[in-house]
Amino acid sequence: MTDARITAMINFVREGSRVADVGADHGYLSIELAASGRAKFVTATEKNPQPLQAARKNISAAGLDNVIDTRLGDGLQVLSAGEVDTICIAGMGGALITKILDESPEVVQSARQLILQPMNASEKVRAWLNENGWAVDDEDLAQVAGVIYEIISAVKSSEVVPKKFKRELSPLLKKFLSQRVEKFRRILNAMSRSPEARMSEKFFATRDELNALQREIDGLP
Ligand SMILES: C[S@@+](CC[C@H](N)C(=O)[O-])C[C@H]1O[C@@H](n2cnc3c(N)ncnc32)[C@H](O)[C@@H]1O
């Protein structure tokens, strides 16, 4: 049930926090947060009834019904301002994560920490944090079954402490960036087959991004 990705997220949660696990799916993150004692209380939200049902079953089997509440609904809309200190959103695309944050400004503003694990477009998440008064105070890379995940912790900019994670020192960074380069290469190859796509803004932006990633890789020890 626990893996390196979930462990990395839990490590960022401050002891005794009240945590929202948005898009809880099977409920594994919520269960680990509560079972480890790291979270004082967890509110697990899910947009879809089926995964929520599975989460409820797993939570009951773990004997954690008294410390994990489950709610059916969209993003943070089923929470009230001040209910949680920490908001975890994991396993979704960067665009969906920022949409969920944008749709519930009062809940987000009342939290002290955001722990985000975007499956893509992490630069979109980082830009959102920057534009909305949050600063990355720590981050990590975690590998599960050959896939490398980015985990970002953010606090209010006014509270910022020096960032702890030295990204360039992570043994996973080169592999992570190389996987992204490969992904961009596949996109560019596919786009090259269409003359229209080959001249599009997206093509050139992707190519620039690929080149920037390659320069980052080349600069690594
Ligand atoms: C890939 S799973 C990730 C599960 C878990 N967070 C993790 O990282 O292991 C994404 C889950 O988010 C749920 N989801 C998608 N959009 C959502 C939204 N707007 N609000 C709440 N849940 C959502 C999906 O139903 C799905 O169960």
Image (cartoon, rainbow, N blue to C red):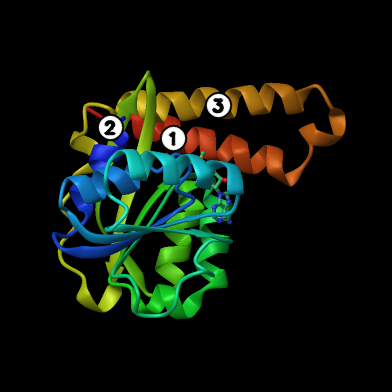
Q: In the drawing, what numbered circle is on residue 213?
A: 1
Q: Mark 2: is the Cβ under 8 angstroms from ligand 1?
A: no
**Which residue in the protein does label 2 denote?**
2
Residue at the (35%, 44%) spot, across then down = 60
Which numbered disc flags the more N-terminal residue, 2 or 1?
2
Number of the label disc, if any, that sits on residue 137 = none
Q: Nearer the viewer, mark 2 or mark 1?
A: 2
Residue at horizontal 70%, vertical 43%? 202
Compared with 96, 171 (above or below) is: above
Residue 79 drawn at (x, y percent)? 46, 71
| Residue of label 3 | 183
Report, in whole angstroms, how far the alpha carbon at label 1 lies from the one at label 3.
Answer: 11 Å
Circle 2 crowding by C-alpha within 10 Å: few under 14, some 14–19, many from 20 = few
Name the residue rendered at 84%, 27% in the picture: 194
Are the residues tagged 1 and 3 within 8 Å (C-beta)? no
Q: Is residue 33 left or right of residue 117?
A: left
Q: What amino acid is at disc 2?
A: Thr
